[in-house]
Image: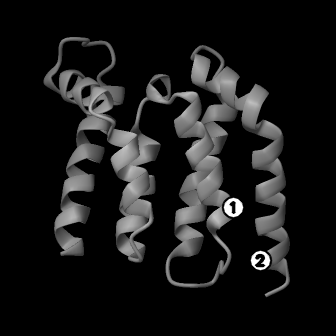
Amino acid sequence: MHGLFIAIVQLMSFFCEEAVNNDDNDGSVFELVSRALNESSRETALFNCIEVPNDDLKLSVVECLYNVSLAEFDSEELTQIVKVLSSCKNIGAGKTELVLAKLFWILAKLTKEEEEDSGKTFRLKFGERAIKEACEILERNMSR
């Protein structure tokens, strides 16, 4: 069953990645599908999948989120990303380190983003909390 969810998330990830990589072609099928996924609450479905106790699915979800255009993240979705950080308690369990690494890459992209509102919103509303969560994760990692 998890394999089906992983395949669906990977398909969504493919369209999102291609839409970002082909951003000069606004009418491309990738852009249209990515926009339709965004309008259909893609991130809500992805964050629900994070709750499933399967490391491969969680990793697929954060890889998909990494491929989503930063312009498509709203404040609620940024809140969810930071909540996922705080929910990772046992860093050494399964693929948690890989999930956290990809989340940190998403946060790095948001931190460096200067043009999109999502980057500005992240830095102003969530930056301090994300740094606190990251430091706590690093501290737990050092104590293992």
Residue 117: x and y, percent?
Answer: 60, 17
Q: Residue furthest bottom?
A: 144
Of residues 9 and 67, which is closer to you in this image? 9
Q: Is residue 79 above or below residue 39?
A: below
Circle 2 — which element? helix
**Quadrant of the rendered structure where residue 27 is?**
top left
Q: Which residue in the structure is indicated by mark 1? A: 86
Residue at 80% across / 76% down in the picture? 140
Residue 2 at x, y percent in the picture: 24, 73
**Disc assigned to residue 141:** 2
Q: Are marks 2 and 1 in contact (CB under 8 Å)?
A: no
Instruction: Judge whether 53 appears above or below 37 on screen.
Output: below
Residue at disc 1, secondary structure: helix
Q: Residue at x 19, y 61 (%)?
A: 7
Colour scheme shown: one colour
Q: Residues within 10 Å of mark 2 (few under 14, many from 20)?
A: some
**Number of residues whose C-alpha sits closer than 10 Å to that of mark 1, classed few (under 14), some (14–19) or many (20 or more):** some
On the picture, is 66 further left or further right than 114? Answer: left
